[in-house]
Image (spheres, rainbow, N blue to C red):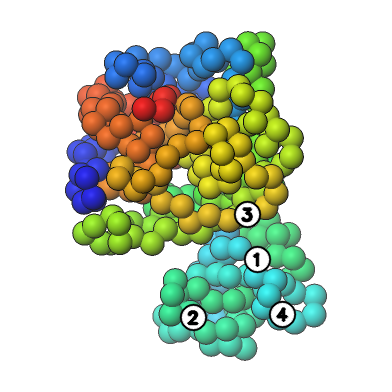
Amino acid sequence: MFSPADYAYDLPPELVAQQPTGARDASRLLHICADGSLEDRMFADLPGLLPADAVLVVNDTRVIPARVLGQKATGGNVEVFFLEPEPATPAPAGMSAWRCLAKARRPLKPGQEVLVNGVALRILTERTTGDGSLAVAAPGDGYAFLDEHGHIPLPHYIDRDDAPADRERYQTMFAANPGAVAAPTAGLHMTPAISAALTARGITIAPLTLHIGFGTFAPIRVDDVRQHTMHRERFVISDTTAALVASGRPIVALGTTALRALEAAATGDHRVAAGPGSTDIFIYPGSGHVFRVVDHLVTNFHLPESTLLMLVSAFAGRDRIMAAYRHAVAQRYRFFSYGDASLLHRA
């Protein structure tokens, strides 16, 4: 139960979705029922599968075009991956500091500049010994620079460069607050029509913001998952969403990111603290975590041996999840970020 291999499964490479479906809500939905049975459905069926008085909590983060390609003054190529603003680090006038990852033939040094289409970034610090990040100064607050010069950071298992269509297709309909470097992918299936159908059933949609970090792609590199260190992510829960959670209605998380924020902010059963916070919570079978807020979860299919597969196994039961994944492979579901979805219920 504590070995990554306990969460391995065989996945044919052709089932990893390289492109999204033509229509967002045309994806499939595997309903992992509370009794352990499985139903092959379509995502458009979701409203009728949720409790009529539920609160659907969604993540309204927006993916930033975090991947930037530039050159050093000597002409050497540099790739800079923007992670998050770092306001505590001083930056030159008219610039802001960001925590970044960088790839270059030789390590970058403080004071060096990286030119991106004629615009200069400035290296502020050496790499840290922890995650290998460094501080980089970008023009203004950085967001306009990224919008003009950055690329959408598609996950490594999508074997292509980002295309212009990914600028919006790799965003959910709720995307409002820029800061994520990966999409809350369960929300990619949502459309105004699905939202209207949910509302017609009395289901309330409640947003929160969790900015998904680069660590969401980080593999487990230890033999015992109890030794794994989880990445930290920033979130904000509004007073309105906290009040809806406390209303006593069933809580549905649209994606593992919404679930992580809610469970990290829990102050009691169906109670969360409003306001900003951050979390490095790692939930897996045997972690001792007791789910106090989320009753139902909509989520995409996750990588073998990943922290997110462990999270959903803790939520719905490992044996049930692994059986569902074997079924999904046999039925040729599409996997990962641009793939199909599943609906599961707290064990």
Q: Amino acid at mark 1?
A: Pro
Q: Position of residue 96 (x, y in %)?
A: 72, 72
The residue under label 4 is 91
Badge number at residue 85: 1
Image quadrant in which you'd find residue 207: top right
Mark before the other along the chain sequence, 1 or 3: 1
Q: Residues within 10 Å of mark 3 (few under 14, many from 20)?
A: some
Q: Residues within 10 Å of mark 4 (few under 14, many from 20)?
A: many
In the visual, does 330 lie left or right of 171? left
Q: CA distance from mark 2 to mark 4?
A: 16 Å
The residue under label 2 is 127
Q: CA distance from mark 2 to mark 1?
A: 16 Å
Q: CA distance from mark 1 to mark 3?
A: 16 Å
Q: Amino acid at mark 3?
A: Gly
Contact, mark 2 vs mark 4 (Cβ under 8 Å): no
Contact, mark 4 vs mark 3 (Cβ under 8 Å): no
The answer to whether one can see residue 313 in this image is yes
Badge number at residue 156: none
Q: Amino acid at mark 4?
A: Ala
The answer to whether one can see residue 195 in this image is no
Name the foreground residue: 45 vs 287.
287
**Relative to residue 151, is residue 200 depicted above or below?**
above
Name the foreground residue: 150 vs 53.
53
The residue under label 3 is 277
Contact, mark 1 vs mark 4 (Cβ under 8 Å): no
